[in-house]
Image (tube, rainbow, N blue to C red):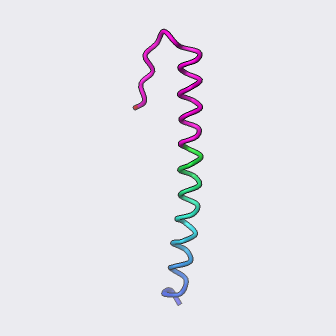
């Protein structure tokens, strides 16, 4: 039973993880661009 379910679950989590990583990366990029736009005199460092 577990042997049949595990591959589907891992594939599902892999797809969901990839989507969430893309969303997080996009949000970080937008936030970085906004920070550079609103605070051009400040050194914006991504930690």
In depth, the one of 1 and 19 nearer the eye is 19
Look at the image and tell me in which quarter the C terminus lies: top left
What number of labels is visible? Answer: 0
* Residue in view at x 48 percent, y 9 percent: 41
Residue 39 in the image, given as x and y percentages of width and height: 54, 14
Q: Is residue 16 part of the magenta span, yes or no? A: no
Q: Is residue 22 above or below residue 33?
A: below
Residue 2 in the image, given as x and y percentages of width and height: 50, 86
Q: Main secondary structure of the magenta part?
A: helix
* Residue in view at x 54 percent, y 66 percent: 13
Q: Is residue 33 above or below residue 22?
A: above
Q: Is residue 7 above or below residue 16?
A: below
Which residue is farthest bottom?
A: 1
**Quadrant position of residue 9:** bottom right
**Quadrant position of residue 24:** top right
* Residue in view at x 58 percent, y 38 percent: 27
Residue 29 in the image, given as x and y percentages of width and height: 55, 34
Q: Is residue 39 part of the magenta span, yes or no? A: yes
Residue 46 in the image, given as x and y percentages of width and height: 43, 30
* Residue in view at x 55 percent, y 21 percent: 35
**Quadrant position of residue 37:** top right
Q: Is residue 5 above or below residue 30?
A: below
Report the magenta residues as a range: 25-46
């Amino acid at each position: 039973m577990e042997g049949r379910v595990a591959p589907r679950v891992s594939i599902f989590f892999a797809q969901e993880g990839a989507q969430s990583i893309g969303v997080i990366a996009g949000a970080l990029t937008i936030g970085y661009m906004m920070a550079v736009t609103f605070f051009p005199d400040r050194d914006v460092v991504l930690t």
